[in-house]
Image: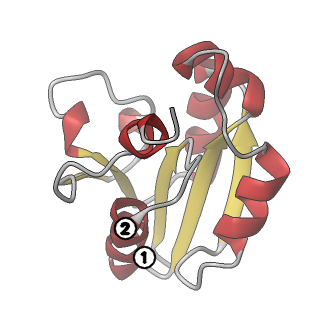
Amino acid sequence: MVKVWTNGCFDVLHRGHIEMLKYAKSLGDELIVGLDTDEKVKKDKGITRPFNKLEDRVAILKSIRHVDHVVAFNSRVELERLIQEYGPDFLVVGSDWKNGEVVGKEYCKNLKFFDRIGDISTTRILSYLK
């Protein structure tokens, strides 16, 4: 069984998220999605986020056919521990992390970067609501 891991906020799902999940699932048999808790999103993105609460984000991700498991994490240390515990064959992250420190990369066999779809982002989508 080939395991694939990806993680993020997945606050307001858009095409870029779906394409990344689809790509990640194409690499293996089981896709595990690590999901930032509300507290972590607020700390990382600001007090107006997340737009959707954790329980809603979990329910939405679980309804996507490409996703097999969703696990929440509240810190970088917890994220790293989860990746180590699951021991994925592939870790998929956005290509904006190519020059950054990818948490958990030492616990996977292959690191894959997924290119952003155009200029779609949750931050941009939410900016239209202001």
> 3 or 50: which is nearer to us?
50
Q: Which mark is residue 98?
A: none
User: Which residue is rendered at x = 58% and y = 57% of the image?
Assistant: 33
The reply to whether callout 1 and callout 2 are in contact (CB within 8 Å) is no
Q: Which mark is residue 25?
A: 1
In the rendered structure, the answer to whether residue 62 lies left or right of residue 126 reads right
Place of residue 4 in the rendered image (x, y in percent of width and height, measured from the top left): 46, 64
User: Which residue is rendered at x = 41% and y = 61% of the image?
Assistant: 17
> 9 or 130: which is nearer to us?
130
Q: Amino acid at mark 2?
A: Arg
> As displayed, is residue 72 above or below residue 41?
below
In the rendered structure, the answer to whether residue 114 lies left or right of residue 20 reads left
> As displayed, is residue 30 above or below residue 83?
below
> As displayed, is residue 7 above or below residue 65?
above
Q: Earlier in the sequence, mark 1 or mark 2?
A: 2
Q: How is the image coloured?
A: secondary structure
Outermost residue, front direction?
130
Other-residue count near label 2 (Cα within 10 Å), few / some / many at <14 / 14–19 / ≥20:
few
> 74 or 78: which is nearer to us?
74
Q: Amino acid at mark 1?
A: Lys
Outermost residue, right direction?
55
User: Which residue is rendered at x = 25% and y = 33% of the image?
Assistant: 97
Q: Which mark's residue is nearer the viewer, 1 or 2?
A: 2
> Residue at label 2?
15
